[in-house]
Amino acid sequence: MTRAPISVPRPPVRRRRQTRRMLAGSVWNLLGVLVGLVMIFPVYWMLASSFKLGVNLRRVDPQWFPAPFTTDSYRRALEQPRFLGSLLNSLVVVGSTALIALVIGFLAALALARMNFTGRKALVILVITIQMVPIEGLIIPMYLMLNKAHLTDKSIGLILAYLSFVLPFTVWMLRGFIAAVPKDLEEAAMVDGCTRGQAFRRIILPLAAPGLVATTVFAVIQAWNEYLFAYVLIKQNTNQTITVWLDTFITTKGVDWGALMAASTLVALPIVVLFAIIQRKVATGLTAGAVKG
């Protein structure tokens, strides 16, 4: 006598799909947390090292938390000469670079996104290609050109050098934001009596404002963190930027790691504060069409 097979009730298809989605979501969340920890760990290590004693920085077994807690490294960092001067030089160079790149980049992006002219596609390809060129490949020709124009060791020369990589990035970013603004709104404004300039000022400019903010932040970060151009083009200590000033903690007698970590924290602080102030605008801009070509 044979028994009939026992049928096991299977969960509904909808429940199985929900379970798979939850598992997939958990895996992606876990992966995101791991990536976040890997990215934040160097920042944490820099911050923790800036509050450690010098003897604890040279231990074979790493000290994960600063104990005892000391601010002596910050005192030594601030006592170094030319800190405020180098900070001011960086603010001037970075601010000028971002402002010039924003004005020229916005006009160029507007032309690429809204106008049809001969060579438009070639210009777009050129902008993308320039971004692919490593900065190391631009050092020698940039130095030769600026030296011939007597602009080395000057802030204006460094600004021009920074524009070589900040401006193409700005054009490409803003082109995506402007292209995301519907042409119908601009045309409707012109039908209602606006001139092209008024339609630009009343329609395109307000809608592209989050993109302008996001692009400005990334342009400032690029210029602020740049080291190689500033190191090669600027020789006088009075004209050096804050990233080059960090070299003062590397001497022939060794590296003052505590003061270097404290100074690096101070150098990163303005960018962190800027990003914290306008992070909502940046997030809005990035989700408003920055990745659209």
Image: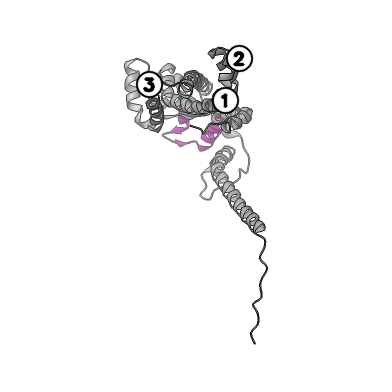
Near-viewer residue (261 or 119): 119
Does residue 263 belong to the magenta stretch?
Answer: yes
Tell me the residue that label 2 is attached to: 192
Classify mark 3: helix, strand or loop: loop
According to the image, label 1 marks what residue?
213
In percent of width and height, residue 204 lies at 56, 21
Q: Nearer the viewer, mark 3 or mark 2?
A: 2
Q: Give the x, y percent position of residue 186.
A: 56, 20
Instruction: Using the image as rendered, state which of residue 167 and residue 51 is in the foreground.
Output: 167
Count of numbered marks: 3
- Residue 13, compared with residue 157, is above or below; it is below
Three-letter code for the amino acid on which mark 2 is drawn:
Asp
Name the residue nearer the viewer: 216 or 19: 19
The secondary structure making up most of the magenta span is helix
Magenta stretch encompasses residue 134:
no
Q: Residues within 10 Å of mark 1 (few under 14, many from 20)?
A: many
Amino acid type for the residue under numbered disc 3: Thr
**Quadrant of residue 128 in the image?**
top left
Q: At label 1, which amino acid type do we have?
A: Val
The label on residue 64 is none
Front: mark 1 or 2: 2
Tell me whether circle 3 and circle 2 mark residues in contact (CB < 8 Å).
Answer: no
| Whole-number angstrom distance, CA of label 3 to CA of label 2 | 30 Å
Viewer-closest of 72 and 11: 11
Marks 1 and 2 sit apart, C-alpha to C-alpha, by: 29 Å
What is the secondary structure assignment of the residue under circle 2?
A: loop
Identify the image quadrant of residue 254: top left
Residue under the point 51% across and 33% down: 292
Foreground label between 3 and 1:
3
